[in-house]
Image (spheres, rainbow, N blue to C red):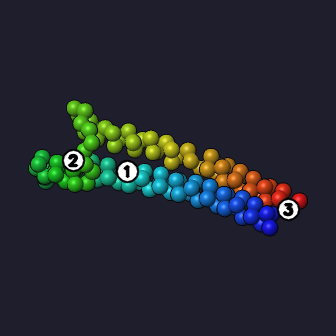
Amino acid sequence: MSNIILTVITILGAVLTLGGLAYGARKLSSEYKELGRKLDEVANISQDSSLTSEEKEARRNATLPITSNWDDVTYFREWVRYFILQQAVTGLGWPAALTASGVVLSTVASTWSVWL
């Protein structure tokens, strides 16, 4: 009976770890895409010559609220966040694959050792 319990706990630990890894990667990727889309939209609004400056400001704030204003760099924090996310997303592939492989292999080894 203890072998079954240890096996279930080991497999559950692997499933939770892999689920957390997948959830984090998906959340990181979606935040990167969403922020990039909003920053592009803000840039398009800023370049629209048919709008007054008040209309541009209102539309930019509706699209992406301003969290900082450092003189001429209005969306400073958002751009920094975007570039950090960009680096994280582009470098995620191999480390995530190696982590997932390690979890699977260690789970198989742990489960197998319980039954030997």
Q: Which residue is mark 3?
A: 115
Say what amino acid the circle numbered 1 marks: Gly
Quadrant for the C terminus in the image: bottom right
Residue 69 vs 50, above or below: the answer is: above
Say what amino acid the circle numbered 2 marks: Ser
**Percent position (x, y) of residue 13?**
66, 57
Residue appearing at x 35%, y 41% in the figure = 79
Q: How much space separates mark 2 and mark 3, taking CA atoms?
A: 65 Å
The tag earlier along the polypeptide, 2 or 1, is 1
In-front residue for pair 97/20 = 20
Q: Which residue is mark 2?
A: 46
Residue 44 visible (yes or no): no
Q: How much space separates mark 3 and mark 1, taking CA atoms?
A: 50 Å
Residue 78 visible (yes or no): yes
Q: Tell me the mark number nearer the camera, choosing from 2 and 1.
A: 1
* Element assignment for label 2: helix
Q: Which residue is mark 1?
A: 36
* Element assignment for label 1: helix
* Element assignment for label 3: helix
**Percent position (x, y) of residue 5?**
74, 64
Residue appearing at x 27%, y 42% in the figure = 67
The tag earlier along the polypeptide, 2 or 3, is 2
Residue positioned most to the front: 1
2 vs 66, left or right, is: right
Say what amino acid the circle numbered 3 marks: Trp
